[in-house]
């Protein structure tokens, strides 16, 4: 008969897993993936190294779950921005402004999410992140095309180009600790709206 964890045991394991992810998130935001060794995470969480392995069999699995957790918050923020009340261009400007503003506000973390060299498992999660961001923008573009407010175009292709362009423009400032010209975010918004075939600024 297979062993079944009691509710108390499962709750303890869940709490330990959450503590491990919280510790790993702190290290990621402070020093990037290189700092997220199992030993360092265990030390930050104040548990034994073996306890980390009970939650995550390998560092690769720990880091992949860490990426999913952190990215989930970023995608949620972008989706909220996309629901901003206003016309299409205001919504797209809100999405780009939110994405870029949050990145520049937490440069070390954003650099880790966007550009830091990572293992293949994490790179696969990075693609999921980019696609999720792309899909949020693509949905708004598709609505605009259908309503005749935007010229005919492939919404997913346009959105993918915007994600790639904005991300690339942010990499340099993020690697430099978030130091960027004051007009960078407005310039990214203007670029994005021009790419859609709309005005340079929201109505």
Image (cartoon, rainbow, N blue to C red):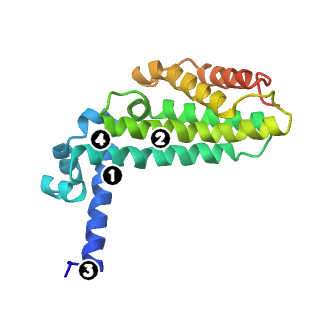
Q: Residue at x 77, y 23 (%)?
A: 197
Identify residue for label 2.
128
Mark earlier in primary sequence (4, 3): 3
Q: Indicate the position of residue 173 as horizontal and vertical percent values.
A: 47, 20
Q: Indicate the position of residue 196 as horizontal and vertical percent values.
A: 73, 26
- Between disc 2 and disc 3, the foreground one is 2
Q: Quadrant of the C terminus?
A: top right
Classed neighbour count for the residue bearing mark 3: other residues with Cα under 10 Å, few (<14), some (14–19), many (≥20): few
- Please say whether residue 29 is visible from this viewpoint: no
- Circle 4 sits in a helix, a strand or a loop, which is it? helix
Which mark identifies residue 22?
Answer: 1
Q: Residue at x 59, y 36 (%)?
A: 134
Residue located farthest toward the bottom when viewing the structure as drawn: 1
Identify residue for label 3.
6
- Circle 2 sits in a helix, a strand or a loop, which is it? helix
Is disc 2 in contact with disc 3, using a CB cutoff of under 8 Å? no
Identify residue for label 4.
27
């Amino acid at each position: 008969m297979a062993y079944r964890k009691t509710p108390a045991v499962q709750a303890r394991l869940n709490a330990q897993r959450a503590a491990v992810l919280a510790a790993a998130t702190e290290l990621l935001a402070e020093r990037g993936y290189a700092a997220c060794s199992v030993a360092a995470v265990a030390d930050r969480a104040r548990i034994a190294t073996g306890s980390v392995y009970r939650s995550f069999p390998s560092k690769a699995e720990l880091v992949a779950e860490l990426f999913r957790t952190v990215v989930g918050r970023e995608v949620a923020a972008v989706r909220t921005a996309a629901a901003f009340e206003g016309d299409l261009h205001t919504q797209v400007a809100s999405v780009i402004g939110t994405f870029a503003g949050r990145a520049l506000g937490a440069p070390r973390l954003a650099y880790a999410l966007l550009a830091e060299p990572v293992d293949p498992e994490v790179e696969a999660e990075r693609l999921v992140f980019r696609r999720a961001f792309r899909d949020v923008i693509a949905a708004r573009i598709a609505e605009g095309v259908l309503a005749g407010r935007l010229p005919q175009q492939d919404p997913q292709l346009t959105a993918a180009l915007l994600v790639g362009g904005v991300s690339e423009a942010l990499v340099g400032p993020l690697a430099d600790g978030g130091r960027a010209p004051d007009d960078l975010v407005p310039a990214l918004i203007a670029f994005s709206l021009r790419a859609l075939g709309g005005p340079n600024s929201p109505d």
